[in-house]
Image (cartoon, rainbow, N blue to C red):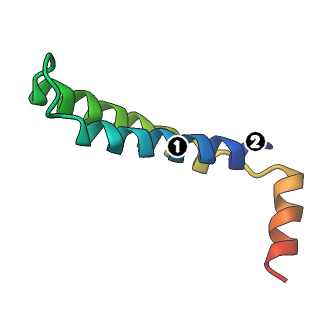
Amino acid sequence: MISREAINREIDRIDGRLKVLETMLGRPGVTSQDFKNEIEKSQELVENLRSMIAREPFSGHEINVNSNINR
């Protein structure tokens, strides 16, 4: 997968935003349990997406880049 690094960066951003949402639980209009349930569901989706990406075969470009980094 050529865009593996970009996708991983986006996943990290999403995960960071979810943590920010966790701190906003005290705001009126949303029950904290509902909010926490949505956060947990979102975090599970992020982890599933990471697993899917990890199972993808590396492209030739990724193999070359990784071999240059590990020298």
Circle 2 packing at 10 Å, graded few (<14), some (14-19), many (20+), is few
Q: Which of label 1 and label 2 is nearer to you?
A: 1
Horizontal placement of 3 versus 53: left or right? right
Measuring from the top left, give residue 45's x and y in whole percent.
41, 34
Q: Amino acid at mark 1?
A: Arg
**Furthest-top residue in this view:** 29
Measuring from the top left, give residue 9's x and y in whole percent.
61, 47
Residue drawn at 35 percent across, 32 percent down? 42
Q: State the mark number for residue 13.
A: 1
> Which secondary structure, mark 1?
helix
Q: Quadrant of residue 29?
A: top left
Q: Is residue 53 above or below residue 42?
A: below
Residue drawn at 42 percent across, 39 percent down? 17
Residue drawn at 76 percent across, 41 percent down? 3
Q: Amino acid at mark 2?
A: Ser
Look at the numbered discs 1 and 2 and tell me whether their residues touch, using CB distance below 8 Å. Answer: no
Q: Which residue is mark 2?
A: 3
Which quadrant of the rendered structure holds the C terminus?
Answer: bottom right
Measuring from the top left, give residue 46's x and y in whole percent.
44, 39
Chain-order first, disc 1 or disc 2? 2
Residue drawn at 18 percent across, 34 percent down? 25
Foreground of the two, 71 or 26: 26
